[in-house]
Image (cartoon, rainbow, N blue to C red):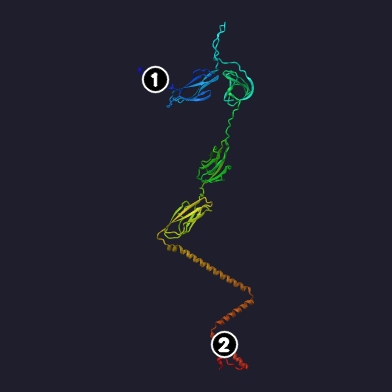
Amino acid sequence: MRKTIKTILLIIFVWIALSILSKSNAATASISASKTTATAGDKVTVTVSINAATWNLEVSGSATDTIVGYNEDAVNEKTTKTYTVTSSKAGTCTVSLTGDVTDGTTDVTSNISDSVTITFKEKTSGSGGSSSSGSGNSGSSSSGSTTTKKPTFKSVNDTVYTKQECNLRSSWSTSSSATSVPAGTELKLTGTSSDTINGYTWYRVTYNGATKYIASYLITYDKPEEEKEEEKSSNKNLSSLSIEGVEMTPEFNKETTQYTATVDGDVTELKIDAKAEDSKAKVTVEGNENLQEGDNVIKVKVTAEDNTTRTYFITVKKGEGTLTDDTLKLSALTIERVNFEGAFSPDTYTYELPLNTFVDSLEITATPNQADATVEIIGNSNFQIGENIVTILLTSADGTETATYQIKVNIAEGATVEEEKGELGMPVYIGIGVGIAVIIIAIYIIIKRKRAKKNDGLNDDLSDDDNININLMSRYEADDEETKRKPKKEKKEDKLDDFIKNDEEEKNEGKPKKPKGRHSM
């Protein structure tokens, strides 16, 4: 039993140890230098070691390299890199290791900041040991020593500028307090020196009313050119604005920001095409979703490059019904003596019309849905047995729209011209005859009435005596006419009576008789 317990405890211990060892591979980093004090011109080796991570190596504040410390399987592995650092002048150089690191094993991210500082001293000529006669003092080497004397400044009054971001020291010591200033900072130069102190030639300047010191190589007498920020465009105009399939009023103008439109009650969203004049401007559309019945305001916002804006407004009135289709088409199509009502539809453009009776043409009436549109019917004459195509061509008033309908008239083989005349021509002839007869009768009645009216007017204008004379003349004319109508025999008898009467009158007067004609015997 004890042996079993020991075995279990041993297994647990081994498991814990393995866990600890596996976690020992956590992200680590270190940086070191071959020496931290060197003479100007010397080369110093800096070694960086990391275990799982991506680090940024910085030399005096400037990032120069990136180091990766894990393999393709995201497993930590140690990586070592070396760098050479040197300086031609006395001073200090700091090499930093900074950045965020993620452990490939635990996915834990941490921030690392580590650095090493190297001090470079001014080169000095070494002197060998010497002894003074009679003295026991030995000479001492001055190699590696730093001059600590106070620099001698020559008074000047100039304006200078910093070449780069740098520190203004409170004294000529590199360890004195510093004020960091950006490149191009204007300084008042009050003193110059040719002395080298702590590896630098120092100049005296005034900054914000305080005396500061700066290495001579960090300043310039020439004012750096200011980086002018590129002027940003303020163009916030639209070059075009339209709604697909919907008329917008008034006509678009980039200076007009208020528009209206009307849509069908089933429309919930519009297809708006809005383009900015300036390619750097941005266009956004608001309120073009879930359009409600009534007025909806859609905003088309244009943001210029300089962030100034202009908004165009479209008031969209959504109705209940369906919008009127203004597309050019026929609103009605009829054919004389053909039942075409059930077959016609404005959106149907081809029709079949079979005929068992021969006709030379059809009486077609085509009505367009646009009042000013023109209608041209082509092929409606000289039909033949078989298929005949009649084309109805519509053209809008401005000529921008056209529509074409076709009627395929199929005349059967058995149809004849006589059948066509007997069936279709006779009603026409009868109608013409009746019309002519009515016209003749009307003309006759009119003439008769005019004559009667004329005679009535003449009698009204004459006096009573004139009327009596007219009546007598009428009688005389009647008697004369009667006389003319008597037969010749009666006329002879009248002459004989006249002769006898004359003879008797002569006897009474005592005149001798004169023989006359056959009665003289």
Q: Is residue 468 above or below residue 133?
A: below
Badge nearest the viewer, 2 or 1: 2
Residue at the image position 51 percent from the left and 67 percent from the top: 436
Q: Which residue is mark 2?
A: 495
Q: Could you tell me which quadrant the N terminus lies in?
A: top left
Tally of numbered tags: 2
Q: Is 200 or 8 nearer to us in this picture? A: 200
Q: Are marks 2 and 1 in contact (CB under 8 Å)?
A: no
* Residue 183 x/y as whole percent: 58, 26
Q: Residue furthest front?
A: 133
Q: Could you tell me which quadrant the C terminus lies in?
A: bottom right
Q: Secondary structure at mark 1?
A: helix
**Position of residue 100 in the picture relative to residue 412 (left or right):** right
* Residue 4 x/y as whole percent: 35, 18
Disc sitting over residue 507 in the figure: none
Q: Which residue is mark 1?
A: 14
Q: Is residue 79 above or below residue 491?
A: above
Identify the amino acid type marked 1. Answer: Val
Marks 2 and 1, the one that precedes in the sequence: 1
Q: For residue 225, which quarter of the picture?
A: top right
Q: Residues within 10 Å of mark 1 (few under 14, many from 20)?
A: few
Q: Secondary structure at mark 2?
A: helix
Q: Is 59 or 287 nearer to us in this picture? A: 59
Identify the amino acid type marked 2. Answer: Lys
Q: Is residue 466 above or below residue 80?
A: below
C-alpha gap between disc 2 and disc 1: 191 Å
Q: Residues within 10 Å of mark 2 (few under 14, many from 20)?
A: few
* Residue 76 x/y as whole percent: 44, 24
Residue at the image position 37 percent from the left and 18 percent from the top: 6
* Residue 285 x/y as whole percent: 53, 39
